[in-house]
Amino acid sequence: MTQFLQPSISLRSLRKGLQFSSSSSFHRSGSFRFRSFSCRMSADSANRSQSITLPCQHEQPVQILAAPGLSDSDLRNAVDSSLFKQWLMNLQGESGILAQGAMSLKRVLIQGVDMFGSRIGFLKFQADIYDKQTGKKVPGIVFARGPAVAVLILLSCEGETYAVLTEQVRVPVGKLMLELPAGMLDDDKGDFVGTAVREVEEEIGIRLKLEDMVDLTGFLDPSTGCRVFPSPGGCDEGIGLFLYRGSASKETIAELQGKETGLRDHGELIKVHVVPYEKLWRVTADAKALMAIGLYEMAKKEGLLPSLKQC
């Protein structure tokens, strides 16, 4: 069985090879033609806009507007961000809203931009998409944050299996939450498994081997995109769920229990918790953990999990 702990390496060295490029995947696809940026300023700065032309509705340009209070640079950054471009690609994909021609996108109002350093972390906008048959607008408020990963870590110790959780301050729900180690992708290269390994190191303080990770969402039907979407009614976040199985001594379990970790300079105040796996589904309200349990149990039932490596 795979041994669990390895010496932690520098997070800075891990990140040196990660460079964010907001436009690389977009330009490779060649999916959209952007008209030149047009800034038509009125006295109240309310009419700033630009337009884009989508291949699926090339005769009907889409107007992109800035909400009051949004700066010109925020508007440009939003339209050029990988979050917005990925959303446009999703609309026109095989199962996309616009793919069959029954609906049309007429306008997008960019309402908010939150920067994470030099890149956009969160993007808030409202899309006016209409059903052509009824002429009615469908709900279209979007909070875009992009893809993320989470890891279900299971440790075998003297005949019992334990799961590793993190306790974190979650301001949006006003609570401390017990969760799987998780995080957002830092770039648009789609390195889900690499991000999963990095997040475990940041939040738990250990390093896992890439080859020991099992993509639980990879067992889903390809039509799903092999990701889970916790809140598709308002958020674009698609999560890749991974499994790590290993062994640990009682001493290791004791060392992990209550360990304080996280990137303190980023405001991450994390405490590690180790709980018996059989109790995991009852001690956490984390949707990532509950979805991972379901995928793990079904994959195990159907014999899809790879064999554990022996020591």
Image (cartoon, rainbow, N blue to C red):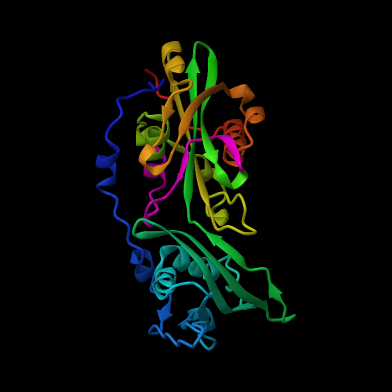
What residue lies at 38% left-to-right and 74% top-to-bottom? 30
Name the one closer to the observer, 287 or 102.
287
Give the residue furthest to the right: 134
The spot of residue 18 in percent (x, y) is 29, 50
Give the residue furthest to the front: 43
Position above or below: 236 against 244: below
What residue lies at 39% left-to-right and 72% top-to-bottom? 73
Position above or below: 143 against 154: below
The spot of residue 308 in percent (x, y) is 44, 25
Name the one closer to the observer, 122 or 149.
122
Check the picture and name the quadrant holding the C terminus.
top left
Q: Quadrant of residue 10?
A: top left
What residue lies at 64% left-to-right and 30% top-to-bottom? 281
Q: Is residue 190 left or right of residue 222?
A: left
The spot of residue 60 in percent (x, y) is 54, 87
What residue lies at 36% left-to-right and 43% top-to-bottom? 194
Position above or below: 63 against 172: below
Count numbered badges in the picture: 0
Residue 128 inside the magenta-drawn segment? no
| Range of residues picked out in magenta | 174-197
Position above or below: 230 against 200: below
Check the picture and name the quadrant holding the N terminus.
top left
Residue 193 inside the magenta-drawn segment? yes
The spot of residue 123 in percent (x, y) is 49, 62
Name the one closer to the observer, 60 or 205.
205
Q: Quadrant of residue 278?
A: top right
